[in-house]
Image: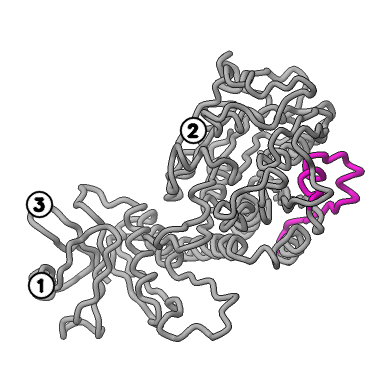
Amino acid sequence: MLAVVSDTQGPRLLPQGPLPPQIRAAVEESLETFGVTGATGEVTRVPAPQQLQARVLVLTGMGPAQDDVTGPSLRRAAGAATRNLSGLDTVALALPTGDADRAAAVAEGALLGSYRFDRYRSVPTPAAKRPVSAVTVCVEGVDEALLEGIVTRSQVLVSAVHDARDLVNTSPADLYPETFAAHAVEAARGLPVDVTVLDENALAEGAYGGLIAVGMGSARPPRLVRLDYCPQAARLHLALVGKGITFDSGGLSLKPAKGMENMKSDMAGAAAVLNAVLAAARLQVPVRITGWLALAENMPSGTAQRPSDVITIRGGKTVEVTNTDAEGRLVLADALVAACETGPDAIVDIATLTGAQVVALGNLISAVMANDDAFRDRVCEAARAAGERAWPMPLPPEMRASLDSSVADLGNVGDRAGGMLAAGLFLSEFVAPPAGAEGTAGAEGAAAQAPDGSDGERPSIPWAHIDIAGPSYNTGKAHGCTPVGGTGVFVRSLVRLAEDLADRGL
């Protein structure tokens, strides 16, 4: 498999490996004959020259020619190739891999593209549509000792992404709070990760008012899952909180029928957190990570919460529920308070939270908001390093007034304009270290800070909120290494963030 780029002179091959000049020339002469343009995502099979030990040569497009071949472009090209080569047992990739980062990008892309969700097919997948079984990456200029680590890391990360995709793609008839929690327990078996599951009785005893309220309308009660990965060498404690609404009907503020079709994906944040924690444990990342999966099913019934109900979130703050379809922030509020009680050095929550995110950034770019600009930028940097797309967004304190309630501490819905930011401001209300926290981040005297960091001081607990409403579920065509359906977005970015914190500190 070779990479093709397009430039002003037409399509051309990118150099890789000791390809004999005569073979290279023959392939390049045939590019236009076979209609090869080098466009991003283009994959073309051509007859292999006789000198090559292969029957078919595959050309994968990388878009316009650049001075530097980037990891993301390699990842997409490799993923597009393996995704389009279903049915083949073995594929060899000869893409430009002159350093460890490029080699890792090709390996990850190839594995990410080799995915298919067939759980509900009554007829076995025909051989012609099965994912590529084995991938060989041709690498030059990378030390062999590094390659073993690259392969292991790529396999761990992609396995985690695939499990997140599987969870998102699973029918909500099969994946609901109890079964999601059971999956987490089973997935952590054999790893240095302790799993604690709070059922509806424990949630009521612990005053988790958000989870209880959201789950009241369903016959399948909520769960809160805590994952603890505590390596001995850890010097930092990162808390990850994931929204896990296993199906979102909107509750009594019922969504239109079309708006419910993909709401099995409303637990993608929890799927990302679960698999990021497990991947970090497999990779032995030297950071303590506490993961929180806030799991509930939002359904309408005679027992469902009502618009105008006032609920009490864990920790004591009261919320007037004006729209039951803004439920994700209620379960996250409980989990954020619980996470703060463990005294982490930093918190990241991730959620399919608002349609406003899709309006603002579309289906490819996640939004990142934070109470600390420096930490927000670290999250965005980790995403870029992992080959995922994220964009920093503000939390304007002027918008906080839109969350005011006449009967409670705050309402669960703010201004419709900038709704993504209002949701982030709501969540920021529940990030504070309580007295007697387990860790050190809640030490007395920590500086307070407005959500936008306007006082120039760092907050007592740096916190970032990631809205993945659009990127978590692909309703369009497959592209690059992204399939139709669940994408597993931000699993790799969260692991990269943990690794970055281990390397550089907070």
Measuring from the top left, give residue 37's x and y in whole percent.
17, 62
Furthest residue in direction top, as rendered: 455
Which residue was labeled with disc 3?
8
Measuring from the top left, give residue 506's x and y in whole percent.
58, 33
Looking at the image, residue 218 sits to the left or right of residue 151; the answer is right
User: Tag 2 or tag 1, which sits nearer the N-term?
Assistant: 1
Crowding at label 2, few (<14), some or many (≥20) Cα neighbours within 10 Å?
Answer: some
- Observer-nearest of 186 and 171: 171
Q: Please, what secondary structure does the residue beneath circle 3 have?
A: loop
Residue 33 marker = 1
Looking at the image, residue 15 sits to the left or right of residue 476; the answer is left
Which residue was labeled with disc 2?
377
Crowding at label 3, few (<14), some or many (≥20) Cα neighbours within 10 Å?
Answer: few
User: Residue 216 in magenta?
Assistant: yes
Measuring from the top left, give residue 144's x and y in whole percent.
40, 65
Q: Is residue 276 visible?
A: no
Identify the residue at horizontal 52%, vertical 38% (top origin). Answer: 356
Q: How is the image coloured?
A: one colour
Measuring from the top left, give residue 105's x and y in whole percent.
39, 58
What residue range appears in magenta? 191-217
Amino acid at dot 1: Thr
Residue 420 appears in which quarter of the rendering? top right
Task: Tell me if residue 105 comes above or below residue 44 in the rendering.
Answer: above
Identify the residue at horizontal 59%, vertical 75% (top origin). Answer: 119
Say which of marks 1 and 2 sits in front.
1
Q: CA distance from mark 3 to mark 2?
A: 36 Å
Q: CA distance from mark 1 to mark 2?
A: 46 Å
Identify the residue at horizontal 55%, vertical 75% (top origin). Answer: 118
Residue 338 marker = none
Is the N terminus in the top left, top right, bottom left or bottom right quadrant? bottom left
Crowding at label 1, few (<14), some or many (≥20) Cα neighbours within 10 Å?
Answer: few
